[in-house]
Amino acid sequence: MIGDVTRDAIHYSSCELVRHSMLNENIAWLDGYLNALSSVDGKPRSYFASAFVLESNSKAASSALVDFFKPEISLSFSKFEEILDWHGYLEAALSDVLLKKPLGAQCEDDLVCERRKYLSFRIMDAIGSMIGSYEKSLLFDAEVKCVNPGSRCRFFLVSYNEQYIVLQFMDENCI
């Protein structure tokens, strides 16, 4: 019996290791994707986008995010909402933060709008491959009060297995 329990524990641990490794690979890909997108948005280094994982440690999403940035940055939220039916919400919200000024140009033509939708779809697809089911997770949409009134810093946190998958979109003058 002890041998079976040990074998089961090893199997469970190896499955968790594989799952954790796959999550890290997917987050690394998504982080690189967002970083590349932000590098062609606006003037050089005027926008920043990233993806990372936060351990929830049974904390509320807002507390986990604030604790992650302490003590270097003190976050103060102007908005922090929990979104239950979030798949369509996030896809539309991503279109608002992606390619605002491609290569520094103001353009709102159909081609740019279609490209935003496609990029949002790719991001949603990546998140879907990480979490498996949208119904088992929540989305938190947070905006940070910025020092510069024209700046904006927005976070999307997707709850997943005692963790949050975080998407961060920031104007250079935000924090």
Image (spheres, helix red, strand yellow):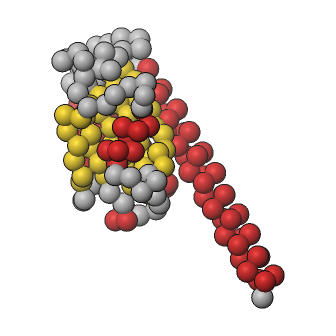
Foreground of the two, 32 or 54: 54
Above or below, 85 against 143 in this view is: below
The structure residue drawn at horizontal position 23% and vertical position 27%, both measured from the top left corner, is: 145
Quarter occupied by the N terminus = bottom right
**Circle count:** 0
Above or below, 113 against 107 in this view is: below
Q: Residue furthest front?
A: 71
Quarter occupied by the C terminus = top left
- Left or right of 155, for residue 31: right
User: Residue 54 appears at what percent x and percent y?
Assistant: 47, 45
User: Residue 110 appears at what percent x and percent y?
Assistant: 23, 31
The structure residue drawn at horizontal position 58% and vertical position 46%, both measured from the top left corner, is: 24
User: Residue 167 appears at what percent x and percent y?
Assistant: 39, 39
Q: Residue furthest bottom?
A: 1
Q: Quadrant of residue 135?
A: bottom left
Foreground of the two, 52 or 29: 52
The structure residue drawn at horizontal position 38% and vertical position 40%, both measured from the top left corner, is: 65
Residue 24 seen in the figure:
yes
The structure residue drawn at horizontal position 24% and vertical position 52%, both measured from the top left corner, is: 82
Q: Quadrant of residue 134?
A: bottom left
Q: Residue furthest right?
A: 3
User: Residue 93 appears at what percent x and percent y?
Assistant: 25, 41
Residue 99 seen in the figure:
no
